[in-house]
Structures are given as C-alpha cells and as structure tokens.
Image (tube, helix red, strand yellow):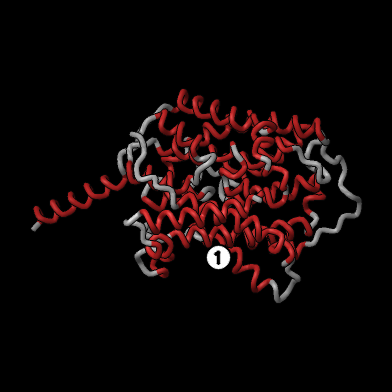
Amino acid sequence: RSLEVVLGGLFLLLLIKFHFDEGFHAREHFMGNVPILEQLLHKDMRAGEWCMLLNLFGLLMGFAILARFFEQSRIPEELPAILPDDWKGGLMLLGMIMLLSTFLDNIAAAMIGGTISMVVYRGKVHTGYLAAIVAASNAGGAGSVLGDTTTTLMWIDGVNPIDVTHAFVGSLFAFLVFGIAGSLQQDKYHKIRKNPPKRLKIHYSKLCLVLAMLVMAVVTNVFFDFPAIGVWIVIIPGSFFIDIPWKATRMAFKGALFLVALVTCASLMPVSELPSASVSTAFFLGLVSAVFDNIPLTKLCLDQGGFDWGVLAYAVGFGGSMIWFGSSAGVALSNMYPEIKNTGNYVRKGWHVSVAYILGFYLMIALVGWNPHASHKNKSKIIDNQEVINKGKAG
C-alpha cells in the first residue's frame, strides 16, 4: 500500500501547511513567483516545484519506454558475448552503469542496468545486486554536474563544475566495495548467461531511438535543466514511424506517481536551516538523504555556504542509495523489481552500500581533505563592486 500511504501523507501535510503555516503560499510554492517560460529559459532559482516534479514524472514515464526499446533492440541479449561469465561480468555491468550516469540522469542509468540484468540473469536478480545498481547509478553522477540533479543544481547556482569532481574519489572507492560485494552475491545467487542466442538479429531502428532519446536528454539537461523534454521530443515524432510500447507507461504510472508524491512531501518539510558546515554535517546529510529528498537539502546548503562542494556532492548524491526510496533511481528500479520495496530486506541484503558510503566518505576526506569553498554568490558580488570602483576611477 505504498502509494496509498504516501498520498495520504501528502494530503495531511497540505492540511497542516494550510491551517498552521501562515507563510505558506501554495501557488508560489508549486508554480514559483516568476513566469514559467522565464523559469525554463533562465533556469531561475525562484522556480516552483512544478518544474522538478514534472521533470521527474516525465523522465520516469519516458525511460520506461526507453528501457523497453532497449530490451526490444536485443542488444542486452548480445552482452553475454562481451561480459565475463563469472562475478566479474556483474562487476563490469555495474561499471558500465556508473559510467553512463556521469553524463546521463541516474534514473536512465538504473533502468538500463535493470533491463540488461533482467536479460543476462534471466530474471533472477539478487536484491543485493539491485541495491548495487542503484548505488552505481548514483555514484557516477556524484562528481559530474550532468549526472545528478543535486550537482546540476550546484552548477546552476554558480558553483564551478571542477569544484565537485573530487567526489569521484569517494565514488570510485565505494564502487570497489559495493561493486565486488554485490557481484559476488549475484554470482552465487544466479550466474550470468554464458552465451548469447545464435543468429541474433539486432533491431537498429529501436536502438537508434534509444540513442536519440539519450542524446536529447543530455542536451535539454544542459540547456534547460529539463531532460524529460528531450526524451519526449524523440518519442512523440517517433510514434509516427514505429510502434511505441505504451503499455510500459501504464505499468510505470503507479511508481511514477509514488515518486512525485514522495518528493512533494519532502518539499513541504519545515526545514529552514542546517547545522554549520563541517565534515560531520556533510556526513550526516548523506545519511539523511537516504530518507529525505536531497534536492531541498542541497538548496539549503547552497544558501548557507561554507561547504566543500565535492564532499557534499558525494554525501547527498550517493547517500540516498542506502535505502531504495532515498533515490529516484531506486524508485524507478522498483517499478521493474517490486521486491526491493521491502525496505528491511533491501537494507539487510544491500548492506555493502551503507558500508561503501562510510568508507568512501572518510577515504575521500583522508586523501583530499575538507576544503570549504568561498561563497560563489558573495564572490560575484565582490567582483561587481570592484567593477563599479574601477569605472569610477576611470571616470
């Protein structure tokens, strides 16, 4: 009854906000206080929640079609020819997912990984390995402003993209932990299929659509921070030339609605300030992001300043992997594998993700250190003021 629970919780939260929070304005909260077109064109930070919610819903529905196209292209059936036929095959697949998520939304990376796993393991995928897929899809985006909503948010707000790249130090070490442990679990549970079917016919038209959807998702993510637009720009015209598996969207609808409602609940939480920026605060925020939406947490950190953005990117980007609903990638994957919605089972069998987060975090601190960045907002004000002074002297 997960959907009923979250919708009921959302209804109660709205009642509380309307009756007890005098500063709450529903229209401003959801629609923003600037025109919608301006929000899209200028990536305005005053944008309402509608942008994020619609983007998530559109991605979940669109990538359900993408995953089905990728499956129908029969490329996943060809992969056993290049993947090792022992636990290293599972590790290589996780590495591919992590690489994909450095430039592609983690939802897409997780669903592509889930689709391939369904084929190469013949539907018998261990919960611990599914947790590793979620972790890989989040680890890759932690140090890239193109691969995760939180790092993209930092980039939009003015953080230098280079300032988040050292998050890869923690991510790569964490990958060795959860990747090896998850692959060994899967190999013991069910081995990878050794040989692909003979005389396999690849459907290149569907593969081209998949590639086009991925490219347009990246393009619209860079220019509009709205990758869902790019996905549907390909799907809608493509429906005139090829049969679209609309049944996949019907199957994904309930999970997409669940995620949107869950993120909406998180956006209504009365969090207005955080503890002062420090190593312990960043580590704690990673734990919190497993049960709380990391987007409003990141917004608060950006407003507060004083964080090491790479350390924070790793914490809030990878930390959500520890529980299946702590990440949009986990929720998306739960549409394909409903068994991971058993939270206790997910945490117990995916124990290596929590261990990987802790070890990766402190190894990153040991190697890179905690180097708080000066506020990018204050820095821009200083530059503007200096320009005014220089103009005055020139005059």
Which residue is under mark 1? 229
Q: How crowded is mark 1: few (under 14 residues within 10 Å), some or many (20 or more)?
A: many
Q: How many marks?
A: 1
- Give whichever of 209, 267 is nearer the camera: 267
Q: State left or right for residue 183 relative to residue 395.
A: right
Residue at 36%, 61% in the rendered image: 25
- Give whichever of 387, 309 is nearer the camera: 309
Q: Label 1, secondary structure: give it.
A: helix
Q: Position of residue 98 (x, y in %)?
A: 62, 42
Residue at 66%, 33% in the rendered image: 350
Q: Image quadrant of residue 246?
A: bottom right
Q: Where is residue 251 in the image (x, y as percent from the top left)?
A: 71, 60
Residue at 42%, 45% in the rendered image: 298
- Give whichever of 157, 257 is nearer the camera: 257
Residue that extends furthest to the right in the rendered view of this protein: 198
Residue that extends furthest to the top in the rendered view of this protein: 366
Reply above or below: 174 against 133.
Answer: above
Q: Where is residue 190 in the image (x, y as percent from the top left)?
A: 83, 36
Residue at 55%, 57% in the rendered image: 56
Q: What amino acid is labelled 1 in the image? A: Ile
Q: Quadrant for the C terminus, please.
A: bottom left
Residue that extends furthest to the bottom in the rendered view of this protein: 240
Q: State left or right for residue 150 relative to residue 137.
A: left
Residue 208 visible to the viewer = no
- Give whichever of 145, 388 is nearer the camera: 145
Q: State left or right for residue 7 relative to residue 187.
A: left
Residue that extends furthest to the front in the rendered view of this protein: 19
Residue 252 visible to the viewer = yes
Q: State left or right for residue 104 relative to residue 394.
A: right
Q: Position of residue 181 (x, y in %)?
A: 69, 29
